[in-house]
Amino acid sequence: MTSLAERLQRKSQKATATKQVRLKLVYVDFWSAVKLSFLIALTLGIILVVATVLIWVLLNVLGVFGAIDGLMGDILNDKSFSVTASFPLAQVGLFAVVVAILNTVVGTVLGAIAAMLYNFSVRVTGGLLVGFTNN
């Protein structure tokens, strides 16, 4: 009488045939590429805004801005200089949002241009050969 584990071990020792498929990528759908590049750029924009705000808050909590205020006060002989007054969180956050919006627009346009260039270059090169296996 054999156990289930022994039967499974014998089954796994059989060599399995590996199928390989080679396909050519000859077309990238323009609107799919635009939508995907928009979503990626939007995600990166959100990450940029959140990271900027978190870094500003972290630097403020750790007292880095206070140290910079003291250093600038010593250099300029003016104790009224304040980093947090010159660059408040709302202003830094708004700047990050503007940069994120611009990056989203530019990223979407670059994705569209890349899709168009690939579709035009396929006519010359014949496409990208991609291999797949069923492992």
Image (spheres, rainbow, N blue to C red):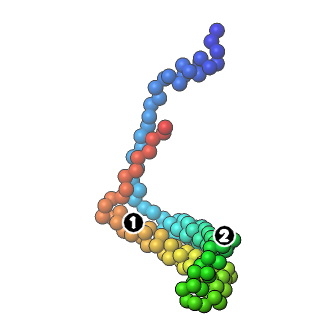
What's the residue at 34%, 66% (across, down)?
121
Q: Which of marks 1 and 2 is nearer the N terminus?
A: 2
Q: Looking at the image, which residue sits at the far top?
A: 1
Q: Is mark 1 on a helix, strand or loop?
A: helix
Image quadrant holding the N terminus, namely top right
Whether residue 94 appears in this view of the structure is: no
Whether residue 127 sits left or right of residue 109 in the image: it is left
Q: Nearer the viewer, residue 4 or 77?
A: 77
Q: Residue 43 carries which label?
A: none
Which structural element holds mark 2? helix
**Which residue is label 1 attached to?**
118
Vertical relation: 125 (above or below) 110: above
Residue with the most extreme left position: 124
How far apart are the two marked residues, 1 and 2, measured between alpha carbons?
48 Å
Question: Few, some or many C-alpha atoms within 10 Å of disc 1 (few <14, some 14-19, many ≥20)?
Answer: some
Could you say where residue 80 lies in the image, as x and y percent from the top left?
A: 65, 90
Q: Where is residue 24 in the image (x, y as percent from the top left)?
A: 39, 53
Q: What residue type is labelled 2?
A: Leu
In the picture of the structure, the residue carrying the numbered disc 2 is 62
Asked whether residue 85 is in view, the answer is: yes
The amino acid sitting under disc 1 is Tyr
